Image (cartoon, rainbow, N blue to C red):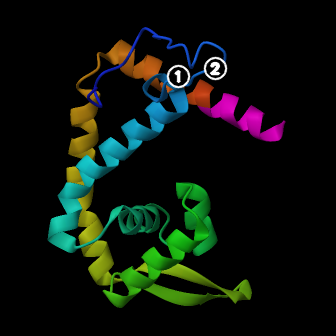
Amino acid sequence: MSENDTPTNVSESSETKDRPVLKLNCFLPYQLSHLAETVSRSFSKIYAEKYGIGIPEWRVIATLGEFEVVTARDVSSSTSMHKTKVSRAVAALEKRGFVARDKNPDDMREQTLRLTETGIAVYEDIIPKALAYSEGLQAALTPGQQELLNEIFNRLHQAARERDIK
């Protein structure tokens, strides 16, 4: 079966009749994760070859470009990346001269992050391409479908948050 096949029937063998079987390609969390990974990998081709950065580094750059000065904890929170992944991405970007660290004046134990001039130039080069990529994906949907998709995302986020609480 190819990755694009979405099975609709469950064929039960004698081994599976007595136990529940999860069809991964029909499992919503997997479908969402797989789509996100596919889109991220596709989009990463826009910046990976030219700038030699990966998805985590791009997410750090995008966050700093949006908020200008934040902590690594802020980046982790806003991108849902684990703090270790953020730390590695920041270290790689700092080594390349894209990101600078400064002492947080409100908490000297913490550092703030910001894009350097080089990092800003990278951000400003990628953003028009990122917006065009996003618009290209959205063009696959009618305006009504785009609105419905946003509603679905909001509902799924809410449902997931409610399950976190339980």
Residue 166 appears left or right of 56: right
Is residue 120 or residue 86 the one in the foreground?
86
**What type is the residue that disc 1 sits on?**
Ile
Q: Is residue 85 above or below residue 18?
A: below
Q: Nearer the viewer, residue 22 or 52?
A: 22
Residue at figure coordinates x 44%, y 86% from the top left: 100
Q: Quadrant of the N terminus?
A: top left
Q: Quadrant of the C terminus?
A: top right
On residue 152, the disc is: 1
Marks 2 and 1: CB-CB under 8 Å?
Answer: no
**Quick one: SS at disc 1?**
helix
Is disc 1 surrounded by few (<14), some (14 to 19) or many (20+) residues within 10 Å?
few
- Chain part drawn in magenta: 157-166
How many numbered marks have been drawn onto this rendered protein structure?
Answer: 2
Q: How far across and how far down the image is residue 51, in percent?
A: 21, 72
| Residue 76 x/y as whole percent | 58, 64
Query: Is residue 160 part of the magenta span, yes or no?
Result: yes
Residue 100 lies in the magenta stretch: no
Residue type at mark 2 is Pro
Residue at 52% x, 56% y: name it.
79
- Report the mark closest to the observer, 2 or 1: 2
* Label ID, residue 20: 2
Q: Secondary structure at mark 2?
A: loop
| Viewer can see residue 79 | yes
Type of secondary structure dominating the magenta stretch: helix
Judge whether 96 appears above or below 151 on screen. below
The x, y position of residue 32, in whole percent, is: 46, 34
The answer for how far apart the CA atoms under marks 2 and 1 are is 27 Å
Q: Earlier in the sequence, mark 2 or mark 1?
A: 2
State the image quarter where residue 16 is shown: top right
Of 70 and 22, nearer the camera is: 22
137 or 33: nearer the viewer:
33
